[in-house]
Image (cartoon, coloured by chain):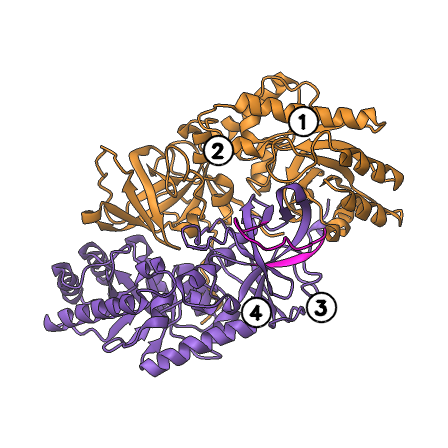
Chain colours: A purple, B orange
Amino acid sequence: MTQALLHPTETDTVESLDTVETPALVLDIAKLDRNVARLRSRLDALGVAFRPHVKSGKSIDVARRLFADGVGPITVSTLAEADYFASAGFTDITYAVGLSPDKIDRTRELVAAGVDLSVLIDSVDQARALVEAARDGGAMPGVLIEIDCDGHRGGVLPDDPALVAIAERLRDGGVLLRGVLTHAGESYGARGGAGLPEAAEQERAAAVNAAEALRAAGHASPVVSVGSTPTAHFAKNLDGVTEVRAGVFMFFDLVMHGIGVCEVDDIALSVIATVIGHRPEKGWILTDAGWMAMSRDRGTQKHPVDQGYGLVCDIDGKPFADLIVEDASQEHGILKLRPGSGAVLPDLPLGTRVRILPNHACATGAQHDSYAVVETGKREVTARWTRMRGW
Amino acid sequence: MTQALLHPTETDTVESLDTVETPALVLDIAKLDRNVARLRSRLDALGVAFRPHVKSGKSIDVARRLFADGVGPITVSTLAEADYFASAGFTDITYAVGLSPDKIDRTRELVAAGVDLSVLIDSVDQARALVEAARDGGAMPGVLIEIDCDGHRGGVLPDDPALVAIAERLRDGGVLLRGVLTHAGESYGARGGAGLPEAAEQERAAAVNAAEALRAAGHASPVVSVGSTPTAHFAKNLDGVTEVRAGVFMFFDLVMHGIGVCEVDDIALSVIATVIGHRPEKGWILTDAGWMAMSRDRGTQKHPVDQGYGLVCDIDGKPFADLIVEDASQEHGILKLRPGSGAVLPDLPLGTRVRILPNHACATGAQHDSYAVVETGKREVTARWTRMRGW
């Protein structure tokens, strides 16, 4: 056997959705641009800066649709993302996952290389580890304190004495405190938009109250950072907030549709698949897109409309009535009409190509190494954009 | 910014579980070897050949623990796996996912390059597409007909007239029929081993009956292939079967434990993670291993013992009583005691490293680019083994 057996993933020939190897990740660039413009215009009207979360795209090419040039600002979820985006010139970075002490050295390397990096902590122990590291006088990241606005995961409550204790520990050790950051993760529990204006206000109030508590104790808090895709789209007032973060807004997905943040037609990401078999007596159509292509995410499982492993469209992106990926093995998807549907199973002969909208764009994207970029309703693949992964 | 910012994934320094970047995929090589020896010895005693499914490991290094040398036989789930393993000398390959017509050219390229490839079909339409391709007289793969033994996904029933019709179409067109293949996918619904000997017998009988039906109609069926990890471990008699396939057996996981196929101590794959925070009032410990590191697989969700996103062990692989990953965001895991547990939450200070056993080894492995290889109970990383992905 020779290396010639290794199948090339890029060719000089023009790709099209009719011929691309399936399964493959497809990005509708017109919808991406529309989703970005929608949120940017909203946040401009509210008078706040925008620091998009690039963990959803994990791609320099996608990030350049958010910022045609410039250094950001961006949010990342791993230090590997920070390395990757910094190497492409995005140097205004917030690493928005609680910092473990053994990652401090990597954050310092980024700062030493010219990155304007903020890290996130929510305990005096983390502040102590940063202060310990800073003793050698070398480069250090700025620090944001994570605020818990809704009990979702980490953070300190705005009125917790730990908030000021962390700030004091940093000041005593000469480490720069930049402000506070919160994320309304519980907003993902909303349905049909209900409660989202209130969740956005709760998120805003928690961050602003925490910043005020710090200021009252004599600490500057120039950064007041909030954000989640649902709250970013429903906030009515962001007084006191300096920046908003959001990630999945750029692609949207069936979970965001169920939450009430987008229409199905806004979803920019899909997986193209090929029909490989039929079980007419069961109402099943089998495809080559299983959970390896779709991810195991079943984010709509508890929604009023359960989308299975995804909603099935024709090759041009038009949904079939009530046709979902009802079940999935590693490399098999089973298409079936929703329970109780009055629709007729479409005739999709062997070899037919379909496009499947994902539950969760971040999870589905992570199963693929690149995007096949198309325009809405067109089949020509105008570009292949690479994704990064790892930690 | 320069390329120097890109963090190296391999270094010349000796890695250890104390220092490796987290989250990371850890493979206990002694357990892998033990799991392989256990099933191989079982199948030797039953007098059948073994064609392991390399989709679980997706790694030449892992596959070489199954076959120190030689060409296989192996099973793959994608043609990218076929390319990858063939390039390393594994040339006896069955591609065990229903063939779509547009993949026929790739299978022919493999055969032309020297691979002894079998493909899987379950319809006259697929047979017709193969016959059409074969008209030019070029290299063609052999064909197996997929048999439905338990209603799990694809395949024809052993007594379906389509079985012989497919064989006739292939013979008329000069395409080689090699036999039949089935997979007892419904065996994953078992709990605690109950029903698995019966599922194995049902799988055997379906395959053998289908082969007999083909032979009665004048078609040779030298290959009678069955397999799933649960049935492979519980079959009492494999008369008439020529080979068994299984994949996840090499690593095992919490789903296999719940089904009753292995002990927790047999699980060879884990994810090492670092503690990044605490919410003592909620009984939560936060780590840097979210669903990006664990996968979204919640395969034990409907088991009597729901393991959340994974069962938590100390750095040396010893489980903590009742400590599971109760919830996960993209890069956050929330550790919590199982509901109703009488155990005490262990004291895991900031920076502590833990190892998390996965629900589903195939899905968790797919989130990572390499294995950090260790011996049971030891922390030195003796090798980094690369994984492949894509289609």
Q: Position of residue A60 (x, y in %)?
A: 50, 69
Residue under pointer 2: B252
Above or below residue B226? Residue A363 is below
| x and y percentages locating residue B91 in the rendered image | 72, 38
Which of the two labelled residues, at mark 2 and mark 1, occupies the earlier sequence position?
A: 1
Mark 3 crowd level (few <14, some 14–19, many ≥20, 10 Å Cα): few
Asked if the residues shown at circle 3 and circle 2 are in contact, with their CB atoms under 8 angstroms apart, the answer is: no
Describe residue B105's horizontal placement relative to residue B26 as left or right: right
Q: Does dot 1 land on a helix, a strand or a loop?
A: helix
- The region drawn magenta spans A336-356
Residue ID for mark 4: A28
Q: Position of residue A387 (x, y in %)?
A: 52, 62
User: Which chain letter matches label 4?
Assistant: A
Screen quadrant of the C terminus of chain A: bottom left
Which residue type does callout 4 highlight? Answer: Asp
| Residue B219 on the magenta span | no
> A243 or A60, which lies in front?
A243
SS for dot 3: loop
Q: Amino acid at mark 3?
A: Val
Label placed on residue B206: 1
Q: Are marks 1 and 4 in contact (CB under 8 Å)?
A: no
State the image coordinates of residue B308 (x, y, percent, origin top left): 37, 42
> Dot 1 falls on which chain?
B
Local secondary structure at mark 2: loop
Q: Residue at x 44, y 77 (%)?
A: A38
Q: Which residue matches tag 3?
A: A14
